[in-house]
Each structure stands twice: as C-alpha cells, then as structure tokens.
Image (cartoon, coloured by chain):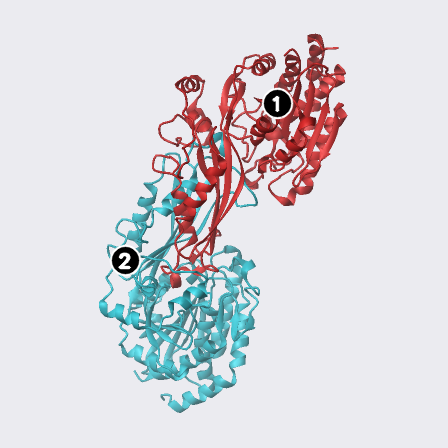
Chain colours: A red, B cyan
Amino acid sequence: MPTTLADFQRVEEYLHAHQQDFIEKLKTFLRIESVSADSKFIPEVKRAAEFVEQELASAGLETTIYETAGHPIVYGSWLKAEGAPTVMVYGHYDVQPADPYHLWKTPPFEPDIRDGHIYARGATDDKGQMLTHVNSAASWLKVVGELPVNVKFVIEGEEEVGSDNLEKFLNEHQEMLKSDIAVVSDTSQFAPGVPAITYGLRGITACEIKLTGPAQDLHSGLFGGSVANPVNVLAKLIASLHDADGHVQIPGFYEDVLPLSEEERTQLGDLPFDEAALFDALGVSAGYGESGFSTLERRWARPTCDVNGIWGGYQGEGPKTIIPSEAGAKISFRLVPNQNAEKINASLKTFLQNQCPPGIKFSYQQFHGCGGLVFDPNSGWMKSASAAIEHAFGVAPVFIREGGSIPVVSTFKEVLGIDTLLLGWGQTTDNLHSPNERFSLEGYRQGTLASARLWHELASL
Amino acid sequence: MPTTLADFQRVEEYLHAHQQDFIEKLKTFLRIESVSADSKFIPEVKRAAEFVEQELASAGLETTIYETAGHPIVYGSWLKAEGAPTVMVYGHYDVQPADPYHLWKTPPFEPDIRDGHIYARGATDDKGQMLTHVNSAASWLKVVGELPVNVKFVIEGEEEVGSDNLEKFLNEHQEMLKSDIAVVSDTSQFAPGVPAITYGLRGITACEIKLTGPAQDLHSGLFGGSVANPVNVLAKLIASLHDADGHVQIPGFYEDVLPLSEEERTQLGDLPFDEAALFDALGVSAGYGESGFSTLERRWARPTCDVNGIWGGYQGEGPKTIIPSEAGAKISFRLVPNQNAEKINASLKTFLQNQCPPGIKFSYQQFHGCGGLVFDPNSGWMKSASAAIEHAFGVAPVFIREGGSIPVVSTFKEVLGIDTLLLGWGQTTDNLHSPNERFSLEGYRQGTLASARLWHELASL
C-alpha cells in the first residue's frame, strides 16, 4: 500500500534523531582515498565501491558490484512500490586527485570538522551529496519498511576521469535500469540559503598535448638559436587558443553554439548574484573572460578553454640554462548544448599541429568528452523536486544552469531516454577539485531531508 | 733561471707515463656532487672546493680557500718565474643540476668510462677541462721543479649560478690577482680533430617569472570563464617574446646589437661545419631560428631567447579539470657584445607585466647577467696558444666564437684589465648541461699536454 505523509513525518523525526550517525558514516567514507585518475590508488577505489555496496545492502536494497574495464559500478535496487514511478539515483564514489597536498590545512583523507563544515577530498564532490540519498532510502526502509517509489542506485567510480565505462554498462543493462527519472546530487546550491535546481549543464572535452624537440635537454648557450624550443612552441600553441577579447580561436569552435535568448539573459541577470563577493572568495582582484557576456553567462552558458596543467624543462631551485627536450600541457574545454566534442577535438588537433615548426614532434591524446544540455524547468519532475527542497530548506529553490559537466546526464538521455533532476546540496565555494574541499553539515542534513521528501513527492506523479 | 724546451720534453714524457693517474684523479673529483644551484648540495660543493685546494697544494702552489656569501673560491699561486708573464688560470668546480636523472645511462656522479669517454656530470664542464691545467702545473713542478711562467689559479664554485660572488672577490684582491693574461678551458673544440681557440662569447641574462591568479586551484567547470587562468596568460607572455620569423619582440632588444661584418660572415661560412650532422646528433629533423642568419651565426653571433623551464597546475597522470592558481617559467637570453643585460631585463619586465590581465599578479626575479665579448684573434697571446695546441693536437686550431657564456671573462676585462685565452678541450656534443655529460679521454690527454706546452710558449712573450 502507498506510503503516506504521516510515514514521511516519522522518517523526518528519525533523520533528525540520527544526524550524528550520518556524519560518522560520511567520515568513514571520506577516509578512503578513492582517486580514480591515478592508478596507484586502485585498491582504495575498490574499497570505496565495497563501502557503498555494503551501505546499500544494509539499508535493504538488492545489490551487485559490476566489474568494468576500469573501476567497478555499484548497483542497488528496491522495486516494491507497485505502480509508483521508478527513480534512478546516480552518484560517484571516486574523487579528484588531492594534490597539491601542501595547501591542505588538514590532510585531504582525514576528515576534519570545523566552522560547521566537514573538510576532506570528496566531501561535497560527490561522497557527501551522494550519501544523502543512501541515508534517506535507508531511513524510509528502517522506519516505514518501504519506500514511496522504486529506486535504482547506480554509483560509479570513474566520474572524475570521464565515466569511460558507464555508457557500456548502461547499454548492456537497459532493461534492468529502465526508470522514469534520474536524480543526481553532484551540483551546488546557488548560494548559502539559496537552494537551486540545475536545469542546464556544460559539456566537456579534454586533451593532453606533448611537444618533443631535441633528443635531450641542450645547453642553451651552445645551441640557443639553432633548434626550436618545445616550451616556447607550446606557449605559442596555447596562446593561439584565444584572441585578445577572450574568444576561442579554434576554427569552427562557436559554429554550433546556440545563442542565449534575451529572456534567459534577463532571468540570469535577475539572480541574486554578488560578483564582488565571488571574486573576493576566489582571491582575485577582478574577473576575466570572453568579452560581451556577463560572468554568469560565461560560467554557465558560454564555452570556455582552460589549460589545467603545463610542464617542461627545469622546475627546481635557481637557474638552469637549457633548451628542454620536451614540454606538455593538459587542456580542457567546457562546452554548451549543441557543440560536438569530437568535431572540436579534430579541429583543435589540426589547428595546433599546423603551428609546430620544423624539428618539433607533436602528439595529441584526447581524454573524455560529452555535450552540454538543458532541461525543461517547468516539468512535473521539477515541480516535485522544488516542493521537496522547499520543505527541507524552508525556501523554494531558484532555477539555474551550471558550468560543470556531468557526462552521464547526457548518457542517461541518450541511452535510457530519461531526464535528470540535478539537486545540489553544496556550495560553489566548497573548493571542489581544490585543496580544502568541504561540505556544510547543514547542507548534508537538509539534503538528506529533501531526498527523503522527494521520494514522497514523486510518488504522487 | 728560465726553463728550456728540454725541460718541457721531460714534462711531456712524464705526462705520457702518468695519464692513468690523471684519469683516476678526475674520477675522484667527478664523484663529488657539487651542484651549486640547489642548496641541498652545499656540503658536496664544499668538498669539491677542498679537493681542488688539496690538489693545488700538493702540486706545490701556495693555496687559500676564500669564503664568500655563497660558495668558496679556491686560490693557488706559484710566483717564482722572475721576469716571466703571470697567467691567471680560471675554472669552476661546481656543476649543473643532474636532473632529469632517469635519462642518464649511468648515474651522473658515478664516473663511467666507455667508448673512449668518461661519463659524469661535470666531466667536461668544467672539472675535466680545469684539471688539465692543474695536472700540467703539477707535472712541471714535479719534473722540473719550477714553472716557465707565474701562475695564479682562481677556481670558483658558482659559475653555473652566475658567479655572483666572484666579482666582489676580484675587486677586493686586485693586487694579489694582478696578471698579464687569463686562461680558461670551459669551451669546446670546433669538432673532433678540429681544435679551436674561442675569440668571442655570448653574454647571458636570465629570470624567473611567476603568475598568480585565484588563491587556489579552481574547478574549471564551475569557474571556467570567470577568471584569468595563469597558465593561459603565461603562455601568452612567452609567445609574445618572438615574432613569426623568430625575432625577439622585447622593445629595444636589438638596439645595441653590432651587425656582423661581411668578412666575419664569410669566415664563419668557411668553417668545416656539418649542419646535418649536428641536427642528427641533437635528434631533430631540422633546425629553427631567427630568419636571415645561418645556424652558426644564430648560435655564436646573434642574441637568443629560450624558456628553460615552465610549470603550473596538474602534471600527474590522467586529466584534472582545474584552473591552476599559479604558473611560472624560467627564461634566459644569450646576448652579444654591446647588449646590456640590465637594460634588457628592465624592458622585458615591463613588456611582460603590461600584458597581464586583471586578476593576475605578476612577479619577476632577475638571475645573473653579463655581456658578450670578442678578442683580437691576432694577438701574441693567441699565437702562443695556437702553437701550444698545434704541438699537442698535431694540427693548428681554428678561431671560432661560442654561443655559451662565461660571465667572469668579461669581469676579468673590466676589473683586472686582462684578456682571456679560451682554450676548449671538449666537444659541443659532450652533453654539457644535459644527461650523459662526457669528456673524451683523448681530449683530456691532449688538453693537459697543450696546457704544459702553453706555459713554455707564454714564457717567451
């Protein structure tokens, strides 16, 4: 029989009484160094998958760990809500590399609670946010013995490296994964006290380029002037990516970009956005970006290009007068709906290679990519999520877009044909991908409550 | 009483008989990790100074180790050749950093003899070449009991980091150091079998720039487009240093450059230079440099600009989608006679700083600098050196210029008013400043013999 509002209220009381238990559970999860980008952490990534599986199992879900060519995918389902919608909850247990370690106030894998936040790599991206849904499902089953909706948890371990094996998994298990809607908490609130539902995401594509000149480092005096210097050439290639106005110069880069509607520009302009406060928080005296667009437009609705890392030659103390043998850089692009990652990579590779002078070998490695997308902010799903958030946060959420990428959201659309509710409990200032990543305990509490309420709201759809 | 040709011939026999001892001595010297650029090697640098002092003392010179604000200077003199010229022998016991270590076939500080060469950091630059003069003086004193000329050895430990404290030393000891000519073996032969006297050197100036953007690494999705990326900006700065033809773009950079005479261009063009063989040895498919000049002109007689190292953001395995907080680069310039390092640094700093966008902090640290210079290839000193080399190598030397810098040579001119004989026993292909640095045993033997003969030749001036 269907669950009731009274059932939810008993769950709400239970959540209130057990908040400390949920914090301890998160701490245990955060101590696992599940860095997916670096192969030396493989055993830790495996431990993180097992942790998630055990949590889902002890909550009362049927669970399986699916091995992949990379890191495993944890699946857990509870399907006894006859006639009710089926919700797929997606999250990831892997985290970004923690370097540079020396910039962390407390060690990245030793969770520390201070000023109302829990600090650790993965606190908000995505261990803490993902656990809110595990907690809420566990609480419903513990208190009520059932869930208002059917749930299918898909928790992967390769989100930070492009979810290379998730698409294959989704394709191979389409029947098992059949759902009505997906729920993902891997985004942020708009600001403290301003919860948000994200209806648009940017896509991403990334690559690594390497330039090789002389067979080994050369004395810059004996040979300076006779051969091309890979670092100088690399700088020239990177500089050529933007013009003086911050526009990307790769041929065809903006070709498929859909213009922002005046209506949306107005709506974005109306958000309570404190630009000065943002730049202050980031520690910059001023912002910078593509001319002709506001900061929010640049972050959410315009494609961008950033070098994520660069190296070459001598990086030690003091001078060393050499011509380096090699130089390299990691470059990533944030894409907007309708841009094509493959097309951009092909154009980029040619654009860069054609600029290399004689005596320089050029190599190009493409990392993961996905397109950006936008959902209808007025759907019934969105209304249910809005109501759940309003109950938990005491205020209705704003509807925003987000500059980050969640590649699987487009895969869900393509492979399973379902939309995704992007419900963020963290803040953009929580140092995602940075030293001193954190998640507010209040966001963790409210997120768990909103999740519990969401199951109730969705049941009536 | 003056020494005779017969005396020299006895010394020559002694050298022939004791070559193996000289090799063992060099090996001992090369095992000392005297890297001056990196403070963690300070004790090793001190050991190298002590080694040199002991060699000079046991040869029969009066020695002193002079402490400086940096690494010590070893002084040794023998001044009993009444009426004969006084020769200052300069060399350095410090070496370049050995990284990247993994590219060495045998460890950089464990000398290995193979295919007629001794392989180790400092083998040719400058431990091996400098020892030839210590060996020859020691042999004269051992065999003949005196030297044909007065000698003053000045062996420093900061050549690879700009000889910051040598100038002060020279100024403070002008009377003690008073000499007629300086001899330095820190250059190269023109090619195997083609010994050379170097009559021109390029100068150098070097700097490190650092760009700081956000207070810490940022998520490139959440913030990409809103702040300037220090790596992208750094690349733009470096790219601006050259135009499409390889000309340096810093305002005033070429202002003081003296044009090459047609006569010298012809003479350089007549040298037996195998360009294809050079590029093959360097492992490049083709050369690259300032348009309008030959490869030798670019290396010896034209100023150049090279980035020696660059860093910023994530350099590990796989992707990491961040906007780095910091980026930096080491840049060095080779200068030609009449260019002014201070003037160029001032112009460079302004040139780069003015290109930084809002939100980027720019810092500039100038390393050492010195001007380039050219000596008269027809002086009596040059003729004596030529005769000595012809005796030892069996062929007269060619007169060349060199792209490297020996800052102290200009200091000798300014402070002591003396010219320098630049007599190189190594090869440009000996991997100076690179992994697998080496020195041919034959060059070591011939250099020692030429040095012994040089004292004889100079005595008659």
- Label 1 residue SS: strand
Q: Residue at x 45, y 44 (%)?
A: A349
Q: Is residue A16 shown above or below A288?
A: above
- Label 2 residue SS: loop
Q: Is residue B71 shown above or below B149?
A: above
Residue B245 seen in the figure:
yes
| Chain hosting mark 1 | A
Find residue A183 and name its label. 1
Expressed as whole percent of the image width and height from the top left, the position of residue B8 reads 41, 87
Mark 1: amino acid? Val
Q: Residue at x 57, y 45 (%)?
A: B317
User: Which quadrant: the N terminus of chain B?
Assistant: bottom left
Q: CA distance from mark 2 to mark 1?
A: 66 Å
Expressed as whole percent of the image width and height from the top left, the position of residue A241 reads 40, 40
Q: Left or right: B420 with respect to A386?
A: left
For label 2, count other residues whose C-alpha is less than 10 Å away and answer few (under 14), some (14-19) or many (20+): many
Q: Left or right: B60 with respect to A185?
A: left
Find residue B134 and name its label. none
**Disc 2 target residue:** B339
For label 1, count other residues whose C-alpha is less than 10 Å away and answer few (under 14), some (14-19) or many (20+): many
Q: Nearer the viewer, residue A383 or B401?
A: A383
Mark 2: amino acid? Gln
